[in-house]
Amino acid sequence: MSQQIIFKNVEDMPYMSISLGSMEWNKTGTWRYLRPRLENKVSPCMEGCPVGQDIERAMVLLGKGKYLESWELFKEENPLVAVCGRVCFHPCESACNRGEFDEPVSINALERFLADTAAKQGWRVKKRIEEGGTKKRVAVVGSGPSGLTCAYHLARLGYEVTIYEALPVLGGMLRVGIPEYRLPKKVLEEEIDQILELGVKVEMNCRLGADLSWKDLQKYEAIYLAMGNHKSKKLDIPGEDLPGVMSGLDFLRDLSLGKKISMGKRVAIIGGGNTAIDAARSALRLGAKPIILYRRTQEEMPAWASEVQEAEEEGVEISYLVSPVRIGGENGKVNKLECVKNRLGPPDEDGRRRPMEIKGSNFSIEVDQVIRAIGEEAELQGLPKNLGVKEGLILTDERGGTKLKKVFAGGDITAQPRTVAHAIGAGKRAAIFMDCFLKNKKWEGLIDDLRLGEKGNLSMRRYRQEEKDREPISNKTVRLRDLNLDYFTFQKRSKMPKLKVQQRLGSFAEVNLGFTQETAVNEALRCFNCGVCNLCDNCYIFCPDVAIRKDVQTGQNIIDYDYCKGCGICVAECPRHALVMEEEGR
Amino acid sequence: MKKIMVGNHAVSWGVMLARAEVISAYPITPQTTIVEELSVLCADGRLNAKFIPVESEHSAMACCIGAAATGVRTFTATSSQGLALMHEMLHWASGARLPIVMANVSRALGSPFNIWGEQSDSLAQRDTGWLQIYCESNQEVLDTVIQAFKIAESVYLPVMLVLDAFILSHTAEPVDIPAQEVIDAFLPPYRPQWRLDPKDPRTFGCVATPEYFMEFRYKMHQAMLASKEVCRQVDEEFGRLLHRQYGLIEPYYCDDAEVILVTAGSVTSTARVAVEELRKEGHQVGLLKLRLFRPFPKEEIKEVVKNAEKLAVLDRNLSAGVGGVFAQEMRAALANWPSHPLIYSYIAGLGGRDVTLPAIKEVLHRTSELAQPPAESLWVGLRGKGVVHD
């Protein structure tokens, strides 16, 4: 420690004000009444991800070319990275702060890039045998995204998991509902293989209520129900039973199971959801001329805009404000579809404007096949009466627990948004609380501790207390107004390269081609890293008191409170709001 | 070598001969051609200096302060509003004891807008801790630039030399350009005791608490007082080498003068003629040219005026409500001397108005006639009020 220099006589002083020694003796930290503090927060993408992935940190790692670490981080929360990188509706991107600045980061495409890289490199998710693993036996009914995810996490938590699947293939809707050109079977199978490699057992062709009874399941100490919605809703119009009328789900399932399909020439697809679009684009690839009939307008369409756009590019015809009235047949075959025109009325319960029939506007179109895709529902069978079912959905609490103590449920058979991401999120949540149940751990209050931000999903890393690399953490979500935008420049988001339309037709080849390494890294570097220190060193550069120091071991920037005067410049100049200012404790 | 050059170029050539290393300036009429010429000299390699263009005079001085702290010879030039904009930095430069040299082309300050000569701009900066030297001719301008660096670097204080707008800045005169080797011998490279150096890191201009601030000011004041002797020695040394010498002040026909006219700047040349002509008419008049204004050469002035009855101070400036600044300074300098001459104050030539030969003669006549100085300054050449308005 330096000594203070004291001049007794004016002659002894230098002619100019200049330091003749160190000022280390002067611990200016005592002047401070406000204290800056490093506080990593939650980025809006993390909060917005129904799976609950640490997207922000994955972007940092990807930007540094650390693909394996980035992929592993995704895999800690989600066993289906390659799947989500293709078919997720990416609410993370809608939440991305960059969206308000210029355009959101292409998180979805980057997730896929990581999964594709992993596949190319043959990376395998790390096996983890929990210390004192209970080896208790757990059953998962249904091998869709929710069941697979629950099985994956339970296996990693040390349980013996058996999946029961009604179909002869694994993957549920991912396998039999999403066409090859959006999610290649090879990609799905590889991710499922990795789950099975953890020791998860599978019983296929084993339908609950037919091949498997509720009693059979009682040998397990916990049960997760995730059978999904595999039944198409009926149109309830005359002629629906004619040959040539089929459900969109049946059509897609038969197609994906390799069954022979008799495809018509002119196919009408009824509905405006993703199933309708998938069915139409599949029919197109089989040589038919599909037309989608939707009762409202494009604005109310539940199908994703990008899917609709791709369908139109490929030549799928879409007719809006049209409802089917009657299916006409001749010689026992469909030959026409009578429709009526609609106009939009006032909004209904879900906020979308209701279609109102225009009397006398009926017209017919000539078709030889009709595919209905107006929604799906669950086929609940083989369940005990006391499980608790309401309006075709299994009732669950905030944990995913049912009225029966050891039975949990999630995915499309419960009341939650019907997306792959929500199904995965539910599977993870159930795994966490099944673990609590099986280990007799207190679960009350856990949800708030594990939730990412105010409304995000739960973090498995947090549950395992493995978030040390993000410490110190606050659960506050960072918004655009919290950022110092002076440090960011406008940069357009990278576009996903796609197969040319001509190459798409007549083939089920994957439409989206994925990012190159260079595109991926550039895109990841667009990430603001909202709320998390990425060692940009602005605080270090700006601190007028040289009170930011580098920790030699961790490389982190540390505030030296012996000298920090609490001026707040570091906080103001932090581009990403990873520093906060608070009152000094007295 | 003699060259015909305007006063502004005399400044630039003086800077070149002094081998300034950093120049940072912002153009302003009537100073602009100083900077233009310097940029040419830098560009064609005759002057090996870093020329830093800036966006304001405040920045120009800040730039000079930073550069000078690293221990390099530093120059800037400005005028009027530009000098006023520098004001805050002027204090810093002197307080930090940085020997920056600046040429100020004296010009009136608006409003009303005016680009012509008047010394109110530099005189308004008299308390900033800068030495000030007022020049009479282009030759003196060039020589003073060179002397200024030597003085500044000897006492670690900045020096401002003042030349009148247009009358010097834009008027061509023959100027003798000293040989470089003579100037090199006169003015060695600048080697300060302290300088910003990454190899020897120090804080410069750090805070001085109440326990120490006064001591720094005392030292600055002592340095300023001591600089008078340095100015004299530097001028004498310059005279020995180049046979041109200007003194701190210059008395002209003062020995037996009853009335002594006091001037600063280019008006001195006109005054010389007035005094000569009045002498021929038998009037016992003299002329005292003030060259060094800060520090104010009290003793030297007292010695010159001790036998005179009256002093007529011609101020090409105005401190509104008081009158001329030079007159105030003269009164202050002589106040504690019981038998000092009566001091008459005249305001003349504001905003570039010509101060003519008849006007100067009238000033001297009026001084002789008036037994006692009026309470307030007299105005020379006020529209519709005769030559001298009282």
Image: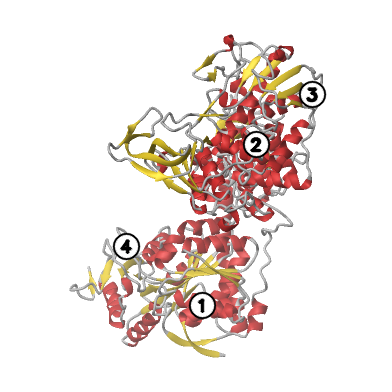
The subunit carrying tag 1 is B
Q: As drawn, which residue projects farthest toward the front?
A: A331
Residue A580 visible, this angle? no
**Mark 4 falls on what kind of element?**
loop
- Tell if the residue under mark 4 belongs to the same chain as the one under mark 3: no
Measuring 71% from the left and 41% from the top, which residue is drawn there?
Answer: A71
Residue A82 in picture, x, y percent from top left: 67, 41
Which residue position holds label 3? A130
Which residue position holds label 4? B323
Q: Amino acid at mark 3?
A: Glu
The residue carrying pointer 4 sits among few (fewer than 14), some (14 to 19) or many (20 or more) residues within 10 Å by Cα, namely some
Which residue position holds label 1? B11
Measuring 79% from the left and 17% from the top, which residue is drawn there?
Answer: A134
The residue carrying pointer 2 sits among few (fewer than 14), some (14 to 19) or many (20 or more) residues within 10 Å by Cα, namely many
Q: Quadrant where the C terminus of chain A lies?
A: top right
Foreground disc of the pair 1, 4: 1
Q: Nearer the viewer, residue A388 or A584?
A: A388
Q: Whole-Å distance between the Cαs marked 1 and 3?
A: 84 Å
Which residue position holds label 2? A175
The subunit carrying tag 3 is A
